[in-house]
Image: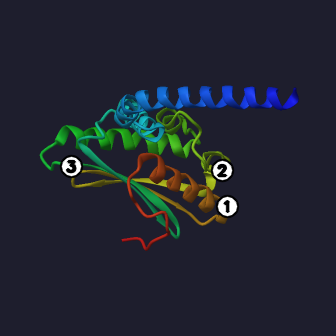
């Protein structure tokens, strides 16, 4: 009796499995094609970062180029208009960076939090050690740069952590390694 029960269960299981395979085979081409057209979670996150960034910063990521640099004494945040004739983007970059220098010096990192929808790594250390970090606005031909410097090793680690996060989340392709100041 037990043998008959086992045979019935195995037969039913094989039948059910074959039916499921047939349904999956029929649906798979549509689902695979649909999934291929859908952006990945990483792509959706990056698009959200760019959209929130445009709103918070006041200039378009599509018309500008961003870079984050790590130096032995700190680093830099850079943005420039891609087109030298785009003075509107250039001026918006300079205006925004002027505000950011003041905010960061006061330990206020709300703008990066709004852009990234999270508190970026390194900001807690940068807040706590704000008296050991200097922020200087430098204008460039097509935009501006925020030069961040410190002599404090803990502040330096926090700055580098913050800049590495920016490189990753903005997908700039910049080096996460410390380089020489140009």
Q: Nearer the viewer, residue 152 or 16?
A: 16
Residue beneath the point at 53% across and 67% down: 73
* Mark 2 in CB contact with mark 1 (< 8 angstroms): yes
Q: Nearer the viewer, residue 173 or 37?
A: 37
Q: Find numbered disc 2 in the image and state the secondary structure of the residue it sits on.
A: helix
Residue occupied by mark 2: 125
Q: Residues within 10 Å of mark 2 (few under 14, many from 20)?
A: some
Relative vertical location of residue 93 with respect to residue 13 in this rendering, above or below: below
Q: Quadrant of the N terminus?
A: top right
Q: Residue 153 at x, y = what percent?
A: 65, 65
Residue beneath the point at 54% across and 34% down: 110
Residue occupied by mark 3: 82
Q: Residue 82 at x, y = what percent?
A: 21, 49
Going from N to C along the chain, the mark reached first, 3 or 1, is 3
Alpha carbon distance from label 2 to label 1: 8 Å
Q: Quadrant of the C terminus?
A: bottom left
Q: Residue 123 at x, y = what percent?
A: 60, 46
Residue beneath the point at 63% across and 32% down: 14
Alpha carbon distance from label 3 to label 2: 33 Å
Q: Residues within 10 Å of mark 1 (few under 14, many from 20)?
A: some
Q: Is residue 49 left or right of residue 59?
A: right
Q: Which circle marks residue 65 in the picture?
A: none
- Say which of marks 3 and 2 sits in front: 3
Q: Find numbered disc 3 in the image and state the secondary structure of the residue it sits on.
A: loop
Q: How is the image coloured?
A: rainbow
Going from N to C along the chain, the mark reached first, 3 or 2, is 3
Residue occupied by mark 1: 154
Q: Find numbered disc 1 in the image and state the secondary structure of the residue it sits on.
A: helix
* Mark 3 in CB contact with mark 1 (< 8 angstroms): no
């Amino acid at each position: 009796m037990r043998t008959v029960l086992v045979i019935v269960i195995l037969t039913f299981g094989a039948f059910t499995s074959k039916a499921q395979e047939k349904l999956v085979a029929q649906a798979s081409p549509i689902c695979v094609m649909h999934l291929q057209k859908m952006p990945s979670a990483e792509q959706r996150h990056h698009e959200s970062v760019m959209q929130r960034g445009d709103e918070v910063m006041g200039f378009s990521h599509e018309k500008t180029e961003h870079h984050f640099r790590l130096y032995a004494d700190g680093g830099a945040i850079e943005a420039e208009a891609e087109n030298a004739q785009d003075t509107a983007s250039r001026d918006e970059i300079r205006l925004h960076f002027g505000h950011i220098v003041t905010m960061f010096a006061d330990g206020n990192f709300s703008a990066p939090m709004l852009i990234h929808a999270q508190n970026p790594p390194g900001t807690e250390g940068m807040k706590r050690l704000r008296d050991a970090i200097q922020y200087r606005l430098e204008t460039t031909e097509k935009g501006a740069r925020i030069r961040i410097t410190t002599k404090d090793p803990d502040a330096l680690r926090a700055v580098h952590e913050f800049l590495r996060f920016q490189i990753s989340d903005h997908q700039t392709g910049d080096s996460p390694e410390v380089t020489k100041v140009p």
